[in-house]
Image (cartoon, helix red, strand yellow):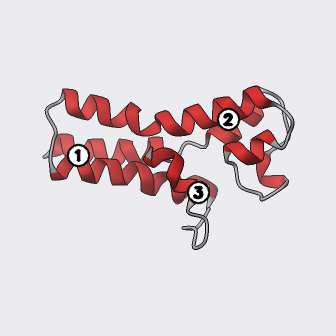
Amino acid sequence: MINQILFVAIAYLIGSLSFGILASKIFSISDPRTMGSKNPGATNVLRTGNKYAAIFTLLGDMLKATMVVAPAIAYDISGLELVVISLAVLLGHVSVSYTHLPLPTKRIGKISVVAV
């Protein structure tokens, strides 16, 4: 039980990592939240003109779920618990607590990258 709760908390925190913002720091580009759609996603990072930063953002967002689900499976977590852990990653991705981004109402593309 404690393992599942810990995995859900870690899943949310990893889901909350914004690879678009990390890419802007690593590649020394403009913060994607200050331009274009003001979304820190791969498409908006691509608007900065740095395709490597956009690829980093896309791959990072895609691998978020894998970074949590693979270890959960290794710990023999399955069924409903695994679904809850997966949903925690998605919720963390769309509702980033430490940057105060609210749940999107019209931006479904944001969740689709992690869901893949």
Residue 66 relative to residue 8: left or right: right
The mark lying in front, picked from 3 and 2, is 3
Pointer 3 residue: 109
- Residue 97 position within the rendered picture, expressed as x and y whole percent measured from the top left: 53, 57
In space, the residues marked 1 and 2 are separated at their CA atoms by 27 Å
Callout 3, which amino acid?
A: Gly
State the residue at coordinates (58%, 67%). Answer: 102
Q: Check the image and report above or below for 94 versus 32.
A: below
The mark lying in front, picked from 1 and 2, is 1
State the residue at coordinates (21%, 32%). Answer: 73
State the residue at coordinates (61%, 71%). Answer: 106
Q: Check the image and report above or below for 105 versus 1.
A: below
The mark lying in front, picked from 3 and 1, is 3
Q: Secondary structure at mark 1?
A: helix
Pointer 2 residue: 22
Q: Which mark is residue 82?
A: 1
- Residue 84 position within the rendered picture, expressed as x and y whole percent measured from the top left: 27, 53
Callout 1, which amino acid?
A: Leu
Q: How many marks?
A: 3
In space, the residues marked 3 and 2 are separated at their CA atoms by 19 Å
Callout 2, which amino acid?
A: Leu
In space, the residues marked 3 and 1 are separated at their CA atoms by 23 Å
63, 112: nearer the viewer:
112
- Residue 21 position within the rendered picture, expressed as x and y whole percent measured from the top left: 70, 41
- The answer to which of marks 3 and 1 sits earlier in the sequence is 1
State the residue at coordinates (36%, 53%). Answer: 88
- Residue 3 position within the rendered picture, expressed as x and y whole percent measured from the top left: 19, 40
Mark 2 Cα shell of 10 Å, populated few (<14), some (14-19), many (≥20): some
- The answer to which of marks 1 and 2 sits earlier in the sequence is 2
Residue 114 relative to residue 25: left or right: left
- The answer to which of marks 3 and 2 sits earlier in the sequence is 2
Q: Secondary structure at mark 3?
A: helix
